[in-house]
Image (tube, rainbow, N blue to C red):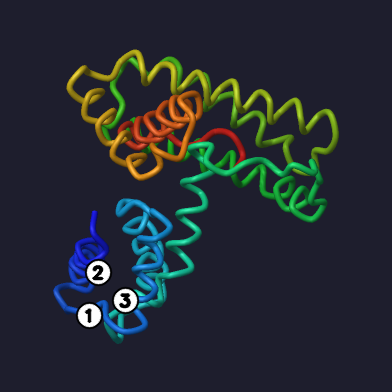
Amino acid sequence: MQTDDYCRDIETYLCRKNDGHLIRVVGPSFGIVSGWADQRIPLKVVFAGIDRYFERYYRKGPRRRPVKIDFCEADVLDAFDQWRRALGLVAADPEGTVDEEATARTSSSLPAHLGRVVTRLTTARATGRIDAGFDGLIDRVAHELDAARASARGLRGEARQALLARLAVLDDELIQRAREIIDAASRDALTLEADAELATYRGRMTADALARARTMAFDRLLREHFGLPIVTLP
């Protein structure tokens, strides 16, 4: 996609989010957005970052002025970073270092994370995004996570690692079930969308890396399709 078309699509989306108020992507704003194009940030990821900013903006109360794209930059870059990590496009730390402060934060937030996962599982079923074929698995996972949440605060060392490993197993079970029950038309549509997301990266990746990224992109879209949460701790 040409940079001008990329900017126009973002301008159109921002206009819609601003209830029809047109904010032009020109001058410094154009420099920001063209930089996103140079980084090959997919439009869907940019839109997700814009959505994040607007969600916070709405929580502050009635809006007082239209939002410029400049205000969304940090959220767009954050969404892009998360997208790349979800698809395995960011390498792990080669030094293998451990961020003690980050470990403490994730440890303290584990009970809250488990609570959010249970809530999203319940919401997905209540809104009809997942069918009866998921019921038994949803009940079992939700029950196990509720029990884990009660004892998760303050976990350290082997006990914490064991719980995190179990969360990964449960997450895999949910994704595997989703792969089994999705209809063929939806599967084909998600496959095309995954390929489109990776189109600008295709020439820069080995065949093995591209295959892994396609699988991860498909699974991410599959999770969105059914409204499934990420059970593992981010």
Q: Is residue 89 above or below residue 215?
A: below
Secondary structure found at label 3 = helix
Pick out the residue farthest to the left: 20
Q: Are marks 2 and 3 in contact (CB under 8 Å)?
A: no
Dot 1: few (<14), some (14–19), or many (≥20) neighbours within 10 Å?
Answer: some
Mark positioned earlier in the residue sequence (1 or 2): 2
Rounded to the nearest whole Å, what is the CA distance between mark 2 and mark 3? 13 Å
Amino acid type at image mark 1: Ile
Instruction: Decide if residue 7 is on the left or right side of residue 100.
Output: left
Image coordinates for residue 100, horizontal then vertical, percent: 82, 51
Q: Residue 193 appears in which quarter of the rendering?
A: top left
Q: Which mark is residue 14?
A: 2
Q: Is residue 212 above or below residue 19?
A: above
- 99 up-or-down from 132: above or below: below
Could you tell me the amino acid type at mark 3? Phe
Q: Residue at x 74, y 35 (%)?
A: 151
How much space separates mark 3 and mark 1, taking CA atoms? Answer: 11 Å
Q: Can you tell which of label 3 and label 1 is closer to the viewer?
A: 3
The reply to whether discs 1 and 2 touch (Cβ–Cβ < 8 Å) is yes
The residue under label 3 is 30
User: Which label sits in the foreground, 2 or 3?
Assistant: 3
Q: Which mark is residue 200?
A: none
Q: Residues within 10 Å of mark 2 (few under 14, many from 20)?
A: many
Query: Residue at left 47%, top 35%?
Result: 205
Cα distance in 3D space between marks 1 and 2: 7 Å
Front residue of 57 and 204 = 204
Residue denoted by label 1: 23
- Kindly identify the residue that appears in the image at 37 percent across and 76 percent down: 31
**Image x and y of residue 62, in percent:** 31, 80
Q: Position of residue 1 (x, y in %)?
A: 24, 54
